[in-house]
Amino acid sequence: MKFELEFVSEDDLRGFIIPYCQEKNHIQQVAFSTYHNCLTQVCFDCQKIRTSIIKDNINQMILNKKEKLAGSDLIEGEKE
């Protein structure tokens, strides 16, 4: 099962998307991150992950994680 990632506003998630999926009896999981201050929905019927996190923040988190792991054996193919 492959999921598509969508960046949407929290207002759209709360006001339209989550209620729509509930009305259609979709299997979904919704979580709010106090750390990232964002709402995320995983809808298994739509096969979509919808989040209000800012896309630039995700890219920065990935870069930070890679920097922390640099020099370790956890990242394969990037050391040489």
Image: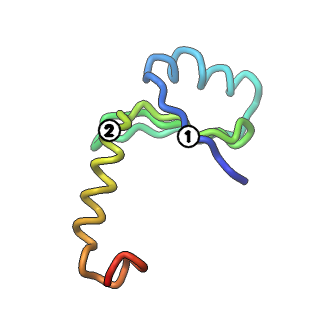
Question: SS for tag 1?
Answer: strand
Q: Disc 2 marks which amino acid?
A: Asp
Does 65 appear above or below 5? below
Q: Distance between the residues labelled 1 and 2?
A: 14 Å
Numbered label tally: 2
Q: Is residue 41 left or right of residue 73?
A: right
Question: In which quarter of the view is residue 17 placed?
Answer: top right
Front-most of residues 64 and 9: 64
Q: Residue at x 45, y 17 (%)?
A: 11
Give residue 14's position: percent from left, percent from top.
Answer: 50, 21
- Look at the image and tell me in which quarter the C terminus lies: bottom left
Task: Judge left or right: residue 31 versus residue 69.
Answer: right
Q: How is the image coloured?
A: rainbow
* Residue picked out by circle 1: 5
Which quadrant of the view contains residue 29? Answer: top right
Q: Which residue is drawn at 62% across and 20% down?
A: 19
Dot 1: few (<14), some (14–19), or many (≥20) neighbours within 10 Å? few
The disc placed on residue 77 is none
- Within 10 Å of the Cα at label 2, are there few (<14), some (14-19), or many (20+) other Cα atoms? few
The residue that appears at 52% across and 23% down in the rendered structure is 13
Q: Residue furthest front?
A: 80
Q: Position of residue 1 (x, y in %)?
A: 73, 54
Q: Which amino acid does label 1 sit on?
A: Leu
> Are the two marked residues, 1 and 2, in contact with CB atoms closer than 8 angstroms?
no
Give coordinates of residue 54: x percent, y percent: 35, 33
> Foreground residue, 23 or 12?
12
Which badge, 1 or 2, is on the more N-terminal residue?
1
Instruction: Determine whether 79 is above or below 11 in the image.
Output: below
Q: Is mark 2 on a helix, strand or loop?
A: helix
Left or right relative to 62: residue 12:
right
Could you say which quadrant of the image residue 44 lies in?
A: top right
Disc marking residue 56: 2
